[in-house]
Structures are given as structure tokens and as C-alpha cells.
Amino acid sequence: MPLSNIEIVHQDDALLVINKPTLLLSVPGRAEDNKDCLVTRLQEHGYPEARIVHRLDWETSGLIVLARDADSHRELSRQFHDRETEKAYTALCWGQPEADSGRIELPLRYDPPNKPRHIVDFEQGKHALTFWRVTARCGDWSRVELTPITGRSHQLRVHMLAIGHPLLGDRLYAHEQALAAFDRLCLHASLLCLTHPQTGERLRFESPAPF
């Protein structure tokens, strides 16, 4: 598959920052028909050394960084593990939150009987923390900025569902009205800040949401 719909936001000898489109895996899936993904496309079209550092869900679009050598991969991975990076997402959620901002601290775990869904589980779930802020109110839905402090799978989607405001177009978690409100998952990685693994410079990247 070509790189035609993949925007390279930044590139240098150490890293690539990509604006990933929706409906593209970050890494290959287990099934044979899920081999097409962001890292494979990059490796096959001029960046054979590209290494994934973190992931975005298949339906989530936006900013993602890849390393171009082993040392950079190690350092960037450490920054994500130690929560030295900054990430923010733009989303559209169903309904109108009563407050203008808040925090969601609910433990999450994978739910094998309903894969690939995740659920809130106070006994077996792993700690997960999200901050949210309403940036616009638009009738049946709201535009929110979501800041995950932890990086659990489906964290933002499950946390917003848990407070009664599922994301629009979410085929896994949205109710019928929220699902029908938009033709894609309205979740976009709009801000990414990290420290350059070679120069030590603090880098900031922004990408406006396409919805």
C-alpha cells in the first residue's frame, strides 16, 4: 500500500512524526489480512529502519512518533514509560457534561468475552487516569480535549463512556445515537510533546482534528 494518505509531519535522523489516518493499524495484526499497517508501509517506502514507539487504535487518527535507530527507540520508549511526554486528544462526545472540566480515575482491563472491548473493573483493572475539558458545546454533542496520564488500551473511549458521554462514531462503545452521529470515530491525537533523543531539544507537534 502507498504512503499517499500518510502525512509526515517531521523527520530527522532519529525519528519520524506521522499524522496517522483513521482505519489504519499502527502495527501488524495477528490475522493474515491485518498485515497492512503504518509501520509496514513506512518500512516498505523509504524508511526500512522505522520502529514503533507507541500506538494509536485502528480508528484513531493523529500524531504518532517512530524511531529510526535502536538508541533513539530506547530513549523515546523510556520517555513514554516514565510519562515524560505530553499527549492530548480532540474528541466529540455525546451529550453535554455538567461541568466544563474534570478527571476520570477508573481502573481498566481487557474483557476477553467481548474482545476487543475493555471495561472498568475495580478489582482486576489497572490504574487509569484521564483529564477532560469541554472546548465547545454543540446541541447533542460536545467537543472535548482529553489528556491521558496513563496509557491503557481504549482508555479514553471507555472513560468517556463510563461518565455517560461516549465518543461519536465509536463502533465498540457508542450507543445507537452516538454511533449514527458521525461516520468515523471522533478521536484524534492532536498534541504530542517529547524530548529529542539525540539533541535533548523539547519538541512540540500539533495537528488539528479533521472533524
Image (cartoon, grey):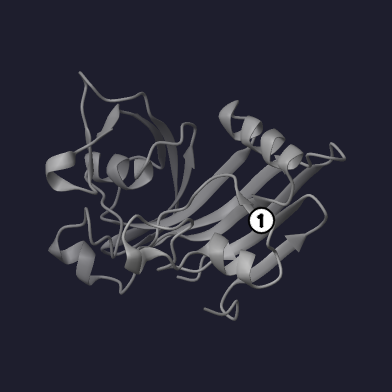
- The relative height of residue 117 versus residue 142 in the rendered view (above or below) is above
Taking the view exactly as shown, the residue that stands out farthest to the front is 32
Please state the horizontal and vertical placement of residue 130, each as a whole percent of the image: 42, 35
Instruction: Tell me if residue 175 comes above or below residue 153 in the rendering.
Output: below
Q: Position of residue 126 (x, y in %)?
A: 33, 25
Q: Label 1 sits on what residue type?
A: Ala
Q: Residue at x 63, y 62 (%)?
A: 18
Q: In terms of depth relative to the viewer, which is nearer, 137 or 38?
A: 38
Q: Is residue 211 above or below residue 126?
A: below
Residue closest to the far right: 199
Q: Which residue is mark 1?
A: 50
Quarter containing the C terminus = bottom left
At horizontal 54% and vertical 46% (from top left) the residue drawn is 88
Quarter-wise, where is residue 53 in the image? Answer: top right
Q: Position of residue 164 (x, y in %)?
A: 21, 45
* 161 left or right, relative to 203: left
The number of numbered badges drawn on the structure is 1
Would residue 122 appear left or right of 81 to someone viewing this image? left
Relative to 60, residue 152 above or below = above
**Residue 63, picture quadrant:** bottom right
Name which residue lies at 52% across and 78% down.
1
Quadrant hosting residue 190: bottom right
Res. 26 visible in picture? yes
> How far from the left and from the top, in percent, is residue 188?
48, 59
Q: Badge 1, how many Cα within 10 Å: few under 14, some, many 20+?
A: many
- Nearer to the camera, 32 or 99: 32
Front-lying residue, 125 or 93: 125
Q: Is residue 168 left or right of residue 41?
A: left
Identified at 57% across, 29% down, the residue is: 81
